[in-house]
Image (tube, rainbow, N blue to C red):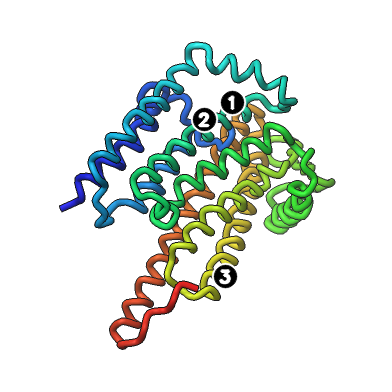
Amino acid sequence: MQNKNLLTGIAIIASPIVFALVAFPGSFSLSWNQGRGGFIFALVFVVAELIGLKIIIPKQRLIAVIPLAAVVIAYLIGLEYGLRDYIIAAAKHFNVQLVYSWTWMWDFIIMGIFVITALSIYFGKRWIRIAPAGPIFLAGSAIILSLDAFFPYDSLGPLQYVVPYMVQTNVWLVNLFHLGTATAHGNMMFLKGDFGAMVLQVFWPSAGVHSIIIYSLVMGAFLLKMNIHRNRKVVYFAMGIAGTIGVNMIRIFSLSYYALKVTTNAKQWEEFHSVAGEIMFLPWLFAFLLIVILIETKRLKKLESEGKSLPKNN
């Protein structure tokens, strides 16, 4: 039988997200900088890390988190009654370049603070080893949105540096498979396919740099709590980085394919572009974490059956 206190604690954390999903479903876009879709993935991380734990959360601690959840819900309601306008108006005082990333940034900051505070109340300092992935995902998303708000497009040189290499690789793949005509200049791709010509300009978020940052934060937190040797952690981390880069190359290639073989209509292409990244990256992230868990669980069971000592968490 599941720990009822723990399930109640999860439900309290989930309540602002569920409220937003029911009250404002249109705000849950899968695009990383156009909505609250990241809330759902953060909640999945929280549930996955907490469900099944044999930890009793005292009733007093559960009650203490309820007012915090109510404050977050009040914030979400307040956005619809003038608070969002105030946030938008404040952007000019901070030299914000992209207002929509600025507004969504505050949603992720508020939700991140709430989840971290709730977990801290539940588990004290142990929360960072019990359920770090969800809060870190929210915090990482807020950081990425802040970078996009203050340094949009190609204005943040270090993050933009890798983009031309990814563009060149994509052009090589398009020509290799004879999908159409493709050339590259810097971060620009010039495509010509079945429906005419289209020019795509790639910036660091679309090249997957934000996915690598999110992966690094979440995977770092995940490996921190795993009782395996440091060398194995390094190998898993490096494999995940390579996989994340590969997934983002597939994403760029799919966007090119869409322009070459499906449509050059800007509106239709943008609709595909807005979801292509998250529907590829986040399933890959979940799948990779699951594979690591399965491998290590099987390995540790084998060590136990052979009577060998378990590794120390180095």
Image x and y of residue 90, in percent: 65, 19
Give the residue number, with chain letter if any, for mark 3: 234
Q: Residue at the far top: name it.
A: 81
Q: Residues within 10 Å of mark 3 (few under 14, many from 20)?
A: few
> What separation in Å lies between label 3 and label 2 (alpha carbons)?
33 Å
Among numbered discs 3 and 2, the one appearing first in the sequence? 2
The image quadrant that residue 144 belongs to is top right
Which secondary structure lies at badge 3?
Answer: helix
Of the residues shown, which amino acid type is indicated by label 2? Answer: Asp
Q: Going from the N terminus, do you reach mark 1 or mark 3 first? A: 1
Residue of label 1:
103
Q: Which residue is mark 2?
A: 107
Q: Quadrant of residue 120?
A: top left
Label 1 sits on what residue type?
Answer: Thr
User: Which of the two residues, 158 or 248, is positioned nearer the viewer here?
Assistant: 158
- Residue, far right: 185
Looking at the image, residue 243 sits to the left or right of residue 307; the answer is: right
How far apart are labels 1 and 3 at the CA level? 36 Å
Q: Are marks 2 and 1 in contact (CB under 8 Å)?
A: yes
Please provide percent x and percent y for residue 52: 26, 55
